[in-house]
Amino acid sequence: MRGIPESWREMTLGDVREGRGTTLDPAKHPGTSFELYSIPSFPSRKPEFVAGREVGSTKQVVAPGTVLVSKINPRINRVWVVGAASGVPQIASTEWIPFPPVEGIDPDFLAYYLQRDHFRNHLAANVSGVGGSLMRVRPAALDAYPLVVAPVKEQRAIVAAIDSHFSRLDAATATLEHVQRNLERYRASVLKAAVEGRLVPTEAELARKEGRSYEPAAVLLKRILAERRRRWEEAELAKLKSKGKAPTDDRWKARYVEPAEPDTAGLPVLPEGWCWATLPMLGEIDRGRSRHRPRNDPRLLGGTYPFIQTGDVRCADGFIRSFTSTYSEFGLAQSRLWPAGTLCITIAANIAETAILGFEACFPDSIVGFVNAERPVLVRFTELFLRTAKAALERFAPATAQKNINLQTLTEVAVPLPPEAEIRRIVDGVEAELERARRVAHDSMRPALGIARLRQSILKWAFEGRLVNAESCAVPSIAVSQS
């Protein structure tokens, strides 16, 4: 390896990585307490202290100072050093690749070395498996990777220097994260004000100020219900005629079922001119379709029809503008193609996430669709309201591993309905405020990217022998900007 001091040694990770270590099944020691290093607990950097009966699978025994590298995608390159002995056995998930303590190598020195982007890219190039979370790095793929080792005194000085610089970067990152949290609170306050009639002047207030009358929401709702009945009658009549059963009177119309009104007991008083409604009163609501089993049958996929899943809704930020999966003609035949403008509401996995389709698409029964083709602005207002109601809807999810709510839950949700003229002004007001928040969030990402690049630069300098003075182990200063 070029560019390292003469006093440093060149090795490989294979020189410091042992083969298969000792494993144990904690369940065979139900009353024993263990210090567990798991992949899920990594972000907190605090191991779990659990009884053997609470650990569900075989673990590997680790010693203080063991460097752990995650081998599972997409969490490869997570690096964690096992802490000092705590008086109980220390164990780790088998999803970690362990580097036990080696004389002459400081564990933190090795851990920082393995956090470089160059090493992460090496891991990413050596994953294997089916895809997604099933892709893993084979430990042997690390053995040929080069390792440079400074004299022990210099290692410790390098670790101290990195710690010092990173602590300042951590402070800058914390400031940016505080900005992001404030933005989230601001967005939530905007939505809450919007659906409570406090974001823009109400139609009743404007009408009084301008000396005119206005149409209250109850009139709009009556019109929507009339349109709903008309569409049902047109569809029903078409079905009867297609079967050669053209009716001779209007008795068939009695089969129409009006949607149930909301239970408003205990609900807050609405602004003047508003009223309560339910989603079935405001438009069509139904579950998506994906009848065929198994759902991963290759015949379903690879065609020209976009196929949206719960993860797509969660990541959409209000509007679904792209897709990663498609249905074939076979897939479409067992599903339904929903129109652009459909509000998608997740009822499984990610509860009550919402987004509006920007194109025709299919989706499975883990998503509910809500449509009012004549009033896209009403659909958008409904999407904004459901964001504010998400926590309440999540409380309906059963306490199971796969949380879900059902269609009935959504049909009973009471939705505040403003006058039609007011809906547009509310939506425009929300869009303006959310766009302002997006710009601030975007601006705050630039220094965050700069911090990430600076971290990698510090690691690069460190392992080229340029971060500390080799003779005195003095640490040069590096300017860190939080702007």
Image (cartoon, rainbow, N blue to C red):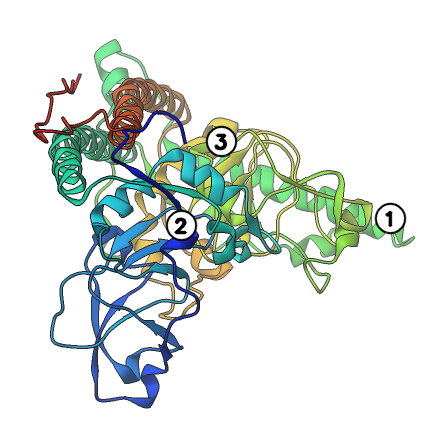
Query: Left or right: where does residue 200 sit relative to residue 166?
Result: right
Give how far across and how far down residue 56 sits, in percent: 37, 78
Instruction: For the N terminus, give its image quadrant.
Output: top left
**Label 3 – label 1 distance at C-alpha:** 39 Å
Query: What residue appears at the point 27 percent right and 29 percent down from the top-left corner?
Result: 5
Q: Which residue is mark 3?
A: 319
As helix, strand or loop, the secondary structure at mark 1 comes to: helix
Q: Is residue 263 something one can see in this rendering?
A: no
As helix, strand or loop, the secondary structure at mark 3 comes to: strand
Query: Left or right: where does residue 24 sit relative to residue 448?
Result: right
Query: What residue appears at the point 31 percent right and 50 percent down from the top-left corner?
Result: 79
110 vs 255: above or below: above
Give how far across and how far down residue 125 sits, in percent: 54, 41
Three-letter code, disc 3: Phe
Give how far across and how far down residue 20 sits, in percent: 43, 69
Kindly indicate whether the residue at mark 2 contacts the one at mark 3 (C-beta within 8 angstroms).
Answer: no
Q: Which residue is mark 2?
A: 13
> Badge 2, how many Cα within 10 Å: few under 14, some, many 20+?
some
